[in-house]
Structures are given as structure tokens and as C-alpha cells.
Image (spheres, coloured by chain):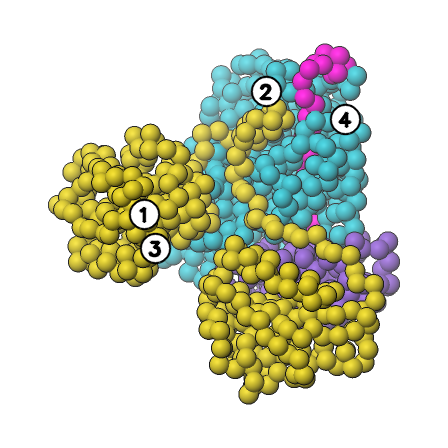
Chain colours: A cyan, B purple, C yellow
Amino acid sequence: MKLELGYIQIKDIQFSKECKVDNGTLYVDPDAVKAYLYEDDDVKAWVKDFGFDIAKPGESVRITPVKDVIEPRVKVEGPGGVFPGVISKVETVGSGKTHVLRGMAVVTAGKIVGFQEGIIDMSGPGAEYTPFSKLNNLVVVAEPNEGYQDHKHEYEHAVRIAGLRAATYIGELGRSVTPDETAEFETYGIKEGLEKLPNLPRVAYVHMLQSQGLLHDTYVYGVDAKRSLTTILCPTETMDGAIISGNCVSACDKNTTYHHQNNPVVANLFAAHGKTLNYVCNIITNENVYLADKQRSSDWTAKLCRLLDLDGALVSQEGFGNPDTDLIMNCKKIELQGVKTVIITDEYAGQDGKSQSLADADPLADAVVTGGNANEVIILPKMDKVIGTLDYVDVIAGGHAGSLRPDGTIEAELQVITGATNEMGFNRLSAR
Amino acid sequence: MATAYNPRDFLILTNNPLVPTCMEGRGLYTIRFQPERSFREILVEARDMVYAGHILYTHPLAGSVKPNETPYKSLVVSMEPHGFDAQHGEMIANAIAVFDKFKPLQRSLGPSVLEDFQLIDYTLLAGAIGFDAQAGLSK
Amino acid sequence: MSYKVVHYINQFFANIGGEEMAHVAPELREGFVGPGMALNTAWKGEAEITATIVCGDSYFAEHEADAKEKVLAWVKEQKPDMFIAGPAFNAGRYGYACATIANAVQEELGIPVLTGMYEENPGADLKNKVLIVATANSAAGMRKAAPVMAKLALKIMKGEKIGASAEEGYMPNGIRRNFFEKEVGAKRAVDMLIAKLSDKPFTTEYPMPSFDRVAPNKAVKDLSKATIALCTSGGIVPKGNPDHIESSSASHYGEYSIAGVDDLTAETYETAHGGYDPVYANADADRVLPVDILREMEREGKIGKLHDFFYTTVGNGTSVANAKKFAAEYAQKLLQAGVHAVIMTST
């Protein structure tokens, strides 16, 4: 399957009476976007109002609590549309041509539960830890209807959909814009790949998806990943929005939708594809709480690795605690099939860095890449402007009574920063 | 590892009041609700049962809410002992080790935050054993 | 004003001589000697070696207590901002001396310390206690090691935050520290996978905790005919600890007869262990070494016989190498005595 991405570089975002992309600037009319969001019945039912704001790199701005980050894209050629099974019809994506509004994101913010973190600082020390400080962000702040307390599942769903709709609306503005740059991505069928790249090791990406419950879920073509068996995806499907994020608790190692669209493992395997390896496919597998599910899913992962006659597999994790068990089960079982693995994780080694980093371990996991110790304490200075609310900073991860100091600085663990210790290997942060 | 799916064998150990509220009488499982127990005490109770041969049905560290943040814990063990499983023993012992490495946080949680922690713990439990979380909440 | 450093080196680096001169006793010299010059040069006046202690490697090994006492007294008198030993490269006894003396200075005088050596040097066993810079395996690595040690030492003296081991050049010491790599994680992972697939060397960023798993023996077929022995690392000894097993870092184990003993009481047994609250073990040592229950099982015919001797040591901080040595020794005794199975209790 072959996908062409056309990158339209967005250098600035401005509010305007009309919506368009012109010479690298996105002009947005918040009222037009809002009207489009309210065309959805769930949004109408649960969201009282949306506020819009713009946050640019280097500004003294803090966005919190962040729910999701999404890159606007639009399908311009080929089957399917963006976010299949959720926004577009459930048609297989990953081929044809897609335009990407690069250098920007739609960020959804607003409280869903009372201990929700997810901080994006656009400048200062916190900005170094989140990739989203480098983007021009269109922030959509949702405010719930009365009575949402008893309907948090519905409200979470409505905010998730609102973010995807906003990104869809913005992405559409790039449909007829000529991209600044294009790139092609193609993986082969099994036999075709063997013929074309006979001497290269065959490698797949085992992509673990958080799938546990409210604010801990991931959706594939609209299917809740915890109700899915381990299966195969073409890498380009991910790029076209086949996987969307429904999780934001403990934001440092949660994959936002942006992470899925720009999955760095996919990007780096494509960079090596045809040169040092043959990138066969993605295997997606869940991280359920029920232990028999863990066993089944990891058994299937290993089985698929064997069936595909892989030489190597790269495994990425999502989340803390019980996914360590899935990670180690996957790694061990795949290795026992004679397929070599590298795993990507992050660490909870305590604030002093002295504790055991993972909740599970195995000697077969001898090649590990780490996204850093999420318990490390960071002091975030006061920002001139807050988009969202600081009401919950004292109860966020690693925070304590007094985390939000009178002078406006925040003392907390890296856990609170969106994407800080991402386990797809999105960042340069590491630990030794 | 765990035996085939048999909800009659599910014993839910919990200190989360939302669990009996939403789930009591709506399935084949048994709920042992002990509000006086701490998060750690629930883990220890489960550990002792696993050591005595009960099966651990759900991972003791469900969710990304860290054990020093939420006071609530629900997990599922078997009603009956089926024989000691070393892997389960290791898993529950590791979970207690993980709990102990997180620094206790000195903070008081308001009622709405406590309710949200209950909600998350409950949905993780529901997700794990295939209980319709939303249906439970409508009760 | 520059920082004051005391440097420790062996007879070889002080130009006294090789193995034939390894017996020389410690001496204190003013200023730098030998490799100290490289450190001084790298500091460019910000810090300076004001005194050098030279000690023969054999002397240190054979008179450790005496050597330590002398060195500590000198260092105390000098009141340096830092104590640096070596680098020792691959010299085993030198490395041991560097790490051991640095650890003593740090613990007893509270002065920050640094040493350097090759990662396979036995002295590197102390890497979780003493900051050790990883060096090449021969003195040819001095030119590379000196600037790394000098830079790290200066940071420590200035009270600056130390970076991750991979950045600063010290051996991983069990404390995880964050830092920014040059490449993103996914790129590092792909590179690591390619290296692993082509059997080229790669370094994991997180070594799994070390495992020393022992495959279990086959189950004892008939317990009612088996002789069972009790062993413990919980430090249970006859009252008074006749063999003086240390309360931590035990150097030996004890072998004691329990023939005819039905129950361990507060009057007859106690624990030598210094790593846990001894009250309950001292009140009833059966809690750690369950002689009473085993006797009961013996009477009921559940087990054939409780072995007449038990083997005991203190697990508190005892090195794995020592523990292995003890067990290898008494395992032979157990085998010779025809013991079928052992219950090993820990605390």
C-alpha cells in the first residue's frame, strides 16, 4: 500500500472572519469551527460551550488540562477519509494522497475529571519536555453542560469527537493548497517484499495500545481496542488517522492522536526501509486489565511475528504499571519465537531515581530504549497566560498540597507534562 | 495462568463505594466491599489469597492513576483456591513493591476529586471483566 | 581561591616501581605526583592537588585496616574539598584499593570522592557506593580519562547537579537520571534493532535488574521418607552467637546441631541479623527457622526426618559472592549427609 503525504507548512495561526490557509498562515473563524462542532449530536448534548485560543512557540502560555492533540489532515485522493470509523465512513485508509497541515495542532483542553493533568508550556523549562511547545496550537477549551458529573463517559466521548471534528474542519482548508513538500511511503505484500528486498531483515512494529477504561482507551477504526484481538495494520493506515487516542491521564506517556498520526517508530522504520531492513507491517495489540486477555494478546503477537517470518520486532508501550506486564510478555514470547526485539518504555524510578524502573522484567528484554524517568521533579515557572484552568494542579500526578505555589510556579513530576516520556520514542529524553 | 472465563469465580476485592453501588446484584461475581481498607491493604489481602492458591484475574496495577494518588483499588481474585501460580504471586508482590516506591503525597482530596477517582477505578474494573460501566452508572 | 584535592595513587604511578615494590607502606607527599599533573592541567587553576598519598597495592591488600587508618588521618588533616583515587584502569588490586579507600573517605569523613577504572576491574563492584569513571583497560587511556574525571570532579566541588552516567562518563550507579540524547527514542530503537539483527554490539539504555534464577529441582517424590534440612539467611544462632557471625556483611556461616531440639526458645536461640527488628525473632526463633513445625511434621510422619544440623548466616548486605561460597560449601555437607531437600528461609 502506498501513501503520499503532502506537507503544508503552517507558520502562523490567526483569528479571522474567514477560514483559509494562505501562504503558510492559517486563518480561522472560531464561530465557523464551533458551528461545525455542534453539528454532532453528542457534542450538542454534553458541551455547553467552546472557547478558542491560539498558543505559539515561545509565548508565556500554559495549556492545561490537555485532553488530546490532533494534527489536521485531509484525504485528497484515494479511498476513505480522515479518522475512519469515527468521523469518516469505516473504509480502509492508508493509500492515495493526504494533505498534512504541518507545524500546527488542534489541542483540546478542559476538565473531565478532577485530577487531570496534561500540561503544555509554550516556553520555559517545561517546553523542552513536550513536543507540542514547538507547534502553533489552536486550542479548543470545552465546557460541560450541567449534570455532566453523572455522565462522564458521554462527556469524554463528546470532547474527543469535538477535537477530531475541529481537526477535520481545519484539515479541509488544506485540500486545494499546493503542498510545500511531498513524501511517499510504501510497504509491500509478503511475497513482493521478499522478492524486492531479498537480503534485508524483515521487521515489524508491535504497537501496544492502552485499553483499560475511561480516559485509558484507544480506538482503531472506531473500535475500542480492548475489544479487539491482536491484528495487523499497514503502517500508512496509522498515518491516515486509523488510530485515535482516548486517554490523557498521566499525560507523560500517553499517546495523543498526534502521536499516532506522526508515529516516530513508523517514521524511522520507513527511513530504514529498503536500506537496512524490510518494514513488513504494524502489529497492534492491546493492554487489557484482565490477565487472560494479556496472555491471549501477547500469545497472538508472538504468533503473528512467527507467521510473518520476521527477523526483528520493535515494541512500543503505552502507560504505566500493568502495561509493563504486557510489554515484558510480548518481548519474551516474541524472543522465544526466535525473533529479535527492541522495546521502548519509560521509567518510574522514584523521585530520587533509585527504585526499580519497571513493574516487570525479564532477561530476554536485553535491548531497551527509555523515554526517561517520569518521577523526576520539575519546577514550572509562572506563565503570563493560562489556557484552561490551574484549579487541579494540587491533585495532579506527583503534585501535592502546595504544588501550585503562591508565586504561580508549579512543582510536580514530569508525569504531568503531555508527551514528556512518550514510549513510542517521540522525544530525545532518556535516562541512565 | 487464569482458567477460562468463569464470572461465578470472580471475587471483587474493593474499597471503592462506587463498585457495590453500580455492580451489586448485576452479575454472577461476588463483591467484597471493605471501605476501611487502604489501597495497600487491598493489595496485601489479594497477595495473601494468591499465596494461598487463589487466581489473580485482573492486573493489580490497572490504569495510569498512580497508587499514591488515588485511595481506591479494586481487583479480582478467584472465589476458590485453584492452586498456587508463581507468576501471579510475582505479579501481586511486584505491585506492592511498586506501591511502596511512590512517595506518600500529603494532600487532602475534595469530594468531587474522590468521586472521580472512584469513577476511574470502577471503569477500569468494569473494563477488565466486561461489565457495562455506563449501564452500571445509570442505576 | 581554588579547590583543594587530595589524590591517592599506587607505587607504580608514583614511579617507585612495579610489582616488586608493591609492598611499600603509605606515604604522604606534598602537591601532585605522576598522573595528578593531568588533573591539575585540566582544572586550569580552578582546583589543585595539594597532597598525594602513595601506597603499595600489596600493602593495602595485606594491611587494609592499617592503610585505611593512615590515609583517613592524613585526609582529615588536609581538609580537602575532594578526594580522588586513581584511575586504576585494569589493575585489580589498585582498583580495589581506590574504590575501598574512596568509600571510606566518603563514609567516615563526609568528603566527596571520585575514582576511575576499567569496568571489569574488581574494584568496580563498589560502583553503586562510589562514583567511578569508566576508563580504558590500560594506562594508555590516561589522556582520555583525566579530562573526564577532572570535569566531573569540578562539578561536584562546585555543587552542580550531576548529569546521567552516559553524559558524565561514570559507571551506572543504580540512580536513574534523565538527560537529552542526540536522537529521538524511535531512531535509537531502530538503530539498536539493526545492530542486534546483525549481531553487532549495542548497549541497552535500561539493563534489566540482574537475575540469578535457579531452575528448581524435581519435586521430592515421597516426603514421608525424605530428610529435610533447614537453612536460613535470617541470622538464627544459638544464644550468644558463639561464632560471632556479623550483623551485616557476614564473612562466614554457622553450622549448629538441632538434634533433640524440639523448639527454639528465647533462652536458647536468637538472631544475629542487624537488618530487621529482632524482637520477634529473639522471642521465638522458630518464626525464622521453623524447627517446631518441622518436628511436628516429623512426628506426624509427613516428613521422614529433620536433618540434625542447620546452616545459618546473615543476609544483611552480605555480598552475593560470599553467599554463593557459603552455600557451595555446606551444600556438599548436606549432600554427604544424604539430605533430600532444604527449606531456606529469608527475612
Q: Pointer 3 indicates a residue of which chain? A: C
| Occupied quadrant, residue A194 | top right
Point out the stretch of residues depicted in magenta. A192-215
Ranked by sequence position, the earlier of labels 4 and 2 is 2
Residue B63 at least partly seen: yes
Name the spot of residue A320 as percent of width and height, x first.
Answer: 60, 49
Between the residue at mark 1 and the residue at mark 4, the CA separation in whole angstroms equals 56 Å
Quadrant of res B27: bottom right
Q: Residues within 10 Å of mark 4 (few under 14, many from 20)?
A: some
Of badges 4 and 2, nearer the viewer stands 4
Q: Residue at x 50, y 42 (%)?
A: A372
Q: Nearer the viewer, residue A291 or A164?
A: A291
Mark 3 and mark 2: Cα distance apart in space: 59 Å
A343, C72: nearer the viewer: C72
Q: Which residue is mark 4?
A: A309
Residue B91 lies, in percent from the top left, at 68, 56
Q: Which residue is mark 1?
A: C57
